[in-house]
Image (cartoon, helix red, strand yellow):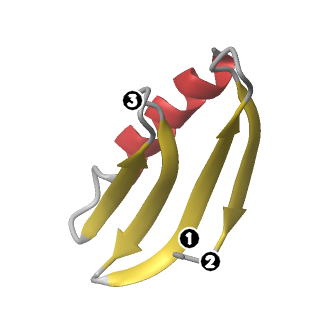
């Protein structure tokens, strides 16, 4: 659950600056699997999330790949 808390804080901080946005993608359970961080229309970085069968975050990967 700590991962979720820090994810919320990161999203709040990023989107308080004009010109920045986040494009989320969710799985069937409503959990984020990809958050694309955008500044002035350009992808800055992307966070990918993986979950175990209990719905717990097992990996958060940050890269620049928006695929």
**What kind of element bears circle 2?**
loop
Rendered view: 65 above or below 48: below
CB-based contact (under 8 Å), mark 1 and mark 3: no
Please tell me how crowded label 1 is: few (under 14), some (14-19), or many (20+) other residues with Cα within 10 Å. Answer: some
Apparent side of residue 49 relative to residue 27 in the rendered image (left or right): right
Q: Are marks 3 and 2 in contact (CB under 8 Å)?
A: no
Pointer 1: what residue?
A: 45
Helix or strand or loop: what does disc 1 sit on?
strand
Marked residue nearer the N-terminal end (1 or 2): 1
Q: CA distance from mark 1 to mark 3?
A: 22 Å
Please identify, in this view, whether the residue under mark 1 or under mark 3 is nearer the observer. Answer: 3
Left or right: 19, with 30 as reference point: left
Residue 64 on image: x %, y %: 62, 77
Tell me how far mark 3 sits from mark 2, CA to CA: 23 Å
Is disc 1 in contact with disc 2, using a CB cutoff of under 8 Å? yes
Identify the secondary structure beneath mark 3. Answer: loop
Dividing the image into 4 quarters, which one contains the N terminus? top right
For label 3, the residue is 30
Q: Quadrant of residue 27?
A: top left
Q: Residue at x 41, y 34 (%)?
A: 28
């Amino acid at each position: 659950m700590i991962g979720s808390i820090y994810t919320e804080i990161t999203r709040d901080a990023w989107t308080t600056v004009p010109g920045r946005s986040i494009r989320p993608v969710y799985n069937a359970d409503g959990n984020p699997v990809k958050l694309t961080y955008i500044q002035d229309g350009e992808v800055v970085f992307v966070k990918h999330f993986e979950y175990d069968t209990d719905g717990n975050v097992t990996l958060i990967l940050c890269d620049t790949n928006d695929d």
